[in-house]
Image (tube, helix red, strand yellow):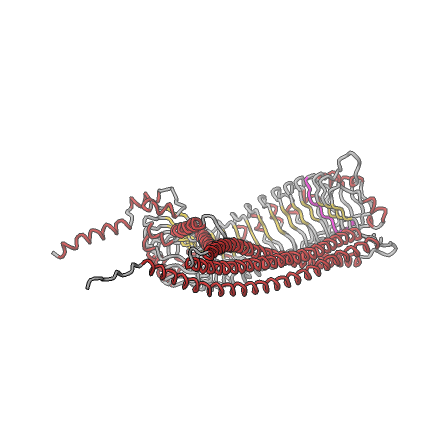
Amino acid sequence: MKLFFLIPLFLFFYQATSAQIFDSLELKTALDRKYVFTSLHLALEKPDEVYKLKLRGINKRLRNIDKEVLYLQDSINTLRSSSRRVMGREKIIARWATKIKTLRKSKFYYDLDSLKKLTRLVHLDLAYNELEDLPDVFRQIPNLRKVNLDNNNLSSLPSSIGSLRYLEELYLQKNKIEVLPDEMEELVSLKTFIANNNQIPNFPEEIGNWKDLEILRADSNKIQSLPASFNQLKKLRLIMLSDNNLTEITAGICKFTNLQELYLDHNSIAILPKNIGLLSSLRVLQLSDNQLSALPSSIGLNQGLRTLNLASNNLTVVPKEIIQLVNLQHLYLEQNIIHNLPKSIGLLSQLKALHLDNNDLTTIPESIGLLENLELLHLDNNKLTTIPNSMCLLTNLQVCYLQNNQLKVFPPSLANLNKLEVLFIHKNQLTNIPDSCISGLVNLQTLSANNNRIAELPNELGPLKNLKRLFLSHNQISKLPRNIGKLDTLIILSLDHNLLTEIPNEIGQLKNITYLFLKDNQIATLPACFYKEKNIRHPLFSLRQLELTRNPIGNKKANRMKLRKLGPDYATIYISEADRYLRSASEAKRAEEQAKRAAIKAKEAEAKAKEAAIAAAEAKAKAKEAEAKAKEAAAVAKEAEADAKEAETKAIAAAKKAKEAIGTPEAKQAEAKAKEAEARAKEAEARAKETAAIAAEAEAFAKSRVANALSKEAAALARAKEAARLAKEAKEKAEEAARLAKEAKDRAKGKRPKKGTKEPKPAPVDSAEDALRKAEADARARARANAKILAAELRIKIAELRIVVAEKRISHAKKITAKAETKANKIAPEVEAEETEESIEKKKKKEPKPKKDNTK
């Protein structure tokens, strides 16, 4: 019998639970639903139809609602306390109060507590909302499969997140999470966990319960070690733990046969697990910026490895086992202490990028020529003296870095690399570039050979038909070949610090040349292609900058005047150090003048701010005076009211006397006087009401004046702050201009010409009269500004005195008002007493006299 009564309860519970958890058909329907709700308001209207929800800007909208409610509440309080006449005051207040209720009600639609009503949610996206905490609502929405909380300000997660037993994807990146709740161990269906850029110190101890986990990203955190249960995550395909505080890796990770990418760079790992080679599916292994000094021999078993990054470690040799990685495409070994490479390195036939820069290599094995797929080769910053001839077989090489070595001969093995686009070979000991070495470089776009000992260039530059950038500064080149004009794609040509004495006229054929650097040579003349001709387009029409400083051509003043007409009108021409000094000095002078003008403007702004402060003070004084007048008018009104009370009292007394002496001439006269007194009383009362109305208007006007004065005062303070800021900026600009001028002058003085040649004196930028005139103008401007400031301060003091006088008048008016009120209060009880006496007498007269009883 008892069980019979429990059946309905059991059925209800069964229905409730079955409604909460989806079956396979409902889940498929929910996941296939493409429509995503982006409004919580709309979602709460149809909670049974909401499967996917994406919300943005929740916190911002809540803050705006709070600000709006606060503003409306202040407006209501101000309107209630105001004594001004406002048409429909109560209606306005009622309308604003209704709006406040509506806004407060709308907060419900931005409150995440209401998420508990959306029990059919499958995807929840709350990224980019500036959330600092989350409500404990996850128990009410158990069907969630994906939760995105990226880019918020969360420092912790609610414990109820552990109730999401069907959750598959959890995104927490770019928050401030300091600890993960232990309840997260119950997320047994989790497949993707993204939590990079947080402050997580460790994972939950029982993270092994996430047995279906495939993607784990927790880089840029503070993780120091991995829990023992981490070894149970055997379905992992991606592990990203870069930029943490790890010192070792658990050996159990070697059993992750599904692992494809492992990122452990920027840690403090010194030793790798011995069996790391068992990761048969591994494609990417990132171990840069650690403390590795050796690699386990088993690493050669990772036959599927495509990328191996061992940069910035303490390796002294390259393990021979690496040669077994036949499918390797990218090998990073830069910034180590490697002295030699394995002779069989050429067996890495699939290699596309090889980084060996910043080591101690002295030789490269001949087998490097077998890397037929190599596209990028970094050998810079080593101690190489030669390049193997087998490099000519690298037919797919596109970028080659050989700078900062000890090469004495341009490598002839580079001659036939017809796909080479970038060659950096600067800071070596090369003496020439043979014609045969560049004949096959038909796709070369950038050649950098600065800081060598090159004396001559190849006669045939025609094969370099795609060359755009040619850097040859700091060499010993004395002559340019005539066929340099064939480099018609050249954009930058740098020949600074060489021994050039002339420039061939064929350089005018470089129609795309934009930057031409010829500084510090022995050039005495320039070809005709540099000069302008009327009505003819300049040959070097693309030129934007020409550097000719420290050349004999700029030593003579006549030459300099002629050279001013060099190049196109829009090109920047540097002819001599004097020219550079003049340019720098003029720029410095211009900057100094701008700084002075800015300082004057700042002074003027300060004066204007003072004037604004004066205006504010005067407005305040006028407001005080208006308030005093209002108080005085109120006092006059009170006095008039007292006079009216006295007149009314006299009128009542006169009426009483008139009633006592009805019919007599004196009574008629008294009645006339009473009527006259009553008329005067009414007139006085009307005047009192009118004066009170005027006083109220004056008081309202005074309050408006006070508000206006306060706003003007605030604006004046703002202008004063802005003026101070401008003055500070002007001072900084002036100091910077002076510093630049001094530096330019020092540079100019530090480079003297050789003996026998007179250094041309730089022409003064301005004459002494101009300087004196400008100084006088500056002085006058400063004097005007100071005078304005003094006058402003005087006007402020006068305004303050006026305020004091107005306050005294207000206190005097208050005293008069108090006296009038006391006087009126004294008269009122007397009038009331007289009125009561008169009413008693009237009642007595109306009462009938008792009749005499004649019967005895």
Magenta segment, which residues? 489-499
Could you say where residue 770 lies in the image, as x and y percent from the top left?
Answer: 82, 53
The structure residue drawn at horizontal position 44% and vertical position 64%, both measured from the top left corner, is: 830
Could you say where residue 232 lies in the image, as x and y percent from the top left?
Answer: 36, 58
Which residue of the protein is positioned furthest toward the top in this rendering?
535
| In front of the other: 113 or 472 | 113
Which image quadrant: the N terminus? bottom left
The structure residue drawn at horizontal position 34% and vertical position 59%, both measured from the top left corner, is: 845
| Image quarter of residue 652 | bottom left
The relative height of residue 488 versus residue 450 in the rendered view (above or below) is above
Could you say where residue 113 lies in the image, as x and y percent from the top left?
Answer: 36, 54
Q: Is residue 122 left or right of residue 290?
A: left
The question of residue 491 being in magenta is answered with yes
| In front of the other: 255 or 694 | 694
The question of residue 633 being in magenta is answered with no
Prevailing secondary structure of the magenta residues: loop
| Image quarter of residue 624 | bottom right
